[in-house]
Amino acid sequence: KLETLRLSGCLVTEEGCASLVSALRSNPSHLRELDLSYNHPGDSGVRLLSAGLEDPHCRLEKLNVEHGGENTMKPGLRKYVCDLTLDLNTVNRLLSLSEENRKVTWRREKQPYPDHPERFEVWEQVLCREGLTGRCYWEVEWSGRKADIGVTYKGISRRGRGDDCGIGCNDKSWSLLCSDNSYSACHNKKSTTIDVPSSSPHRVGVYLDWPAGTLSFYRVSSDTLTHLNTFHSTFTEPLYPGFRVHDVDSSVSL
């Protein structure tokens, strides 16, 4: 007896929802849980499915239609694209934000930011405002000699020069150190080097599957994603995307 049906990210549209509801109503069903997250059922599809919860002939008890929308019709990981914004309260004073807080650049002079307990005092880093707990994908462009692209728990230290502040240098964070000829996947003072062609584009895709405990990095070339590394962990708190810029006038942008 089928009691749970998981169709997350299966490109189900409004029309598909209507067919699904019709099938559930026309056949006696034992289905109790239906997962349609990361699809595009539209308002009418959601209404039809929600009505099924009230139908005495339908045994459906749990319905998940979270994270719906047109983005979910995109192929592959891009269906999980999320909007991110750099957090002005975390940015180091040698860094400036631009392009509606989606680009960070290392400047020659310190910026006049006010004191804030979440600001990185020494490390040239910045976090995003959004704490992530679902399935999320984002792409990052970097310039300069190298850059760190990663995620961290909010509790990462902000004071001093120690590894407890560096994204990827402690047990609270994970990162990919990007340079022209190689990448290094870093977590808790351990790193794995990944060789790449010197002509590689300076664009990286990041896919977080928080419930599954995976964080994956990809090299992005036009529409092609080349897998670089996947971290496996048991995440216990929201993860905040974060970046480190290594050179004057170099930048990272979302």
Image: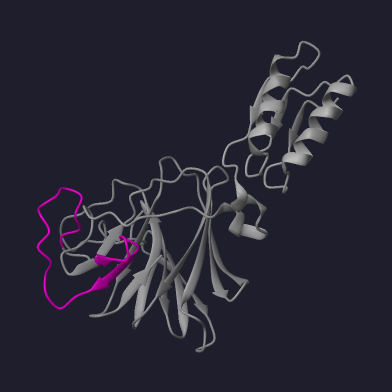
Residue range highlighted in magenta: 97-121
Which of the 4 image quadrants contains residue 238?
Answer: top left
Q: In this picture, is 78 found above or below 13? A: below
At horizontal 78% and vertical 24% (from top left) the residue drawn is: 31
Residue found farthest to the top: 56
121 left or right, relative to 146: left
Magenta region includes residue 57: no
- 41 and 93: which one is in front? 41
**Residue 157 percent coordinates (x, y):** 23, 52
Q: In this picture, is 102 found above or below 65? A: below
In this picture the colour scheme is: one colour
Magenta region includes residue 114: yes
- 189 and 147: which one is in front? 147
- The C terminus is located in which quarter? bottom left
**Residue 202 percent coordinates (x, y):** 46, 78
**Residue 161 percent coordinates (x, y):** 18, 63
